[in-house]
Image (cartoon, rainbow, N blue to C red):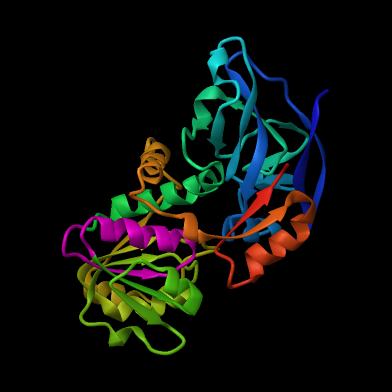
Amino acid sequence: MTTTRALVISAPHTLALRDVALIAAGPGDVIVTTRHTSISAGTERMLLAGRMPHPMLQFPVVPGYETVGVITAVGADVPAARLGEWVYVGGARCFHDVNAAWGGQSAQLIVDAARAVPLGALTPSLGVLLALAATALHGVDLAAPTSGSRVLVLGQGPVGQIAARLAAGRGAWVTVADRNPMRLALSRADARIDTTQRGYEAADGRFDIIIEATGSMAALTAALPQLGDGGTIMLLGYYDELQLPYMPLFLRQARLLTAREWAPGDLRRCLAALQDGTLDLAPLITHRRPIAEHAAAYATALDDPACLKLILDWE
């Protein structure tokens, strides 16, 4: 049985790089040798804490859905021309006796060839941002800002940064809010609110759309009075549960929206925007670590406020 090295969470707060067994590749599969991964500060934090509720995420589990690598083998039904291709893979369920959530933190992945997204001329390491970019794009699509819309984006982590850029690209007037001056400085927005210095009431007028990207119900609750009549709230964080006061929602006749990670085609739309420079996300990669330093890497990615996106190098 073929094995590979993978990051495995075996119990709450217990992470190790160890051997795991791989399933056999099928005729429509490719084998991807991993070069770069990243750490999702939202979902992987909850997974490490043992707070993910879905049965398929039970321990032991391989986390991760931000993998970039090279196709090093192809099944009989896959064109040989794909060998050597740099691709993005949003995780894989290719392991024996270990769950995948979502299985991307592994030295090798076996996936259906259609799920290996070719990166073309894109700088390969930027490919780790495709998942979050597509998540932000899907949320912005649902919130549907238009030219002249007033949009408040709460939180300037990677998803919030990307959502603000996408909303601005549609002609919206964008205000961003965060507690971290470094993250605010990287933002592309018409106005910035440092929530440690002032409240949302300092904003000029009410907002048509609030995009929540902090994962904090408290942050959203504080901003609710700034929502305009008939306004939209788009939830782009990841939450244990929703706890919001009903009265401000009722008074504004607010629409509360949630989004899946992304819709079909969103990954390729984001890839095209990265390739042609419409979406510049290189500044969001702030840290790098070799996979041998995975413990320090997770501590940085989850706890260092100066870290927006950390790349793990597997070579």
Q: Residue at x 72, y 37 (%)?
A: 107
Q: Residue at x 78, y 56 (%)?
A: 293
- Count of numbered labels shown in the rendering: 0
Magenta stretch containing residue 152, yes or no? Answer: yes
Relative horizontal placement of residue 47, taking residue 128 as reference (left or right)? right
Tell me residue 300's x, y (percent): 67, 66
Q: Residue at x 40, y 77 (%)?
A: 221
Tell me residue 164's x, y (percent): 35, 62
Using the rendered image of the protein, determine whether residue 103 is visible from the camera's viewpoint.
no
Q: Residue at x 42, y 47 (%)?
A: 134
Relative to 245, is 13 above or below?
A: above
Tell me residue 249's x, y (percent): 29, 72
First to last magenta residue range = 146-172
Answer with the quarter of the image where residue 299 lies. Answer: bottom right
In which quadrant is the N terminus drawn? top right
Answer with the quarter of the image where residue 207 lies. Answer: bottom left
Relative horizontal placement of residue 206, taking residue 128 as reference (left or right)? left
Magenta stretch containing residue 97, yes or no? Answer: no
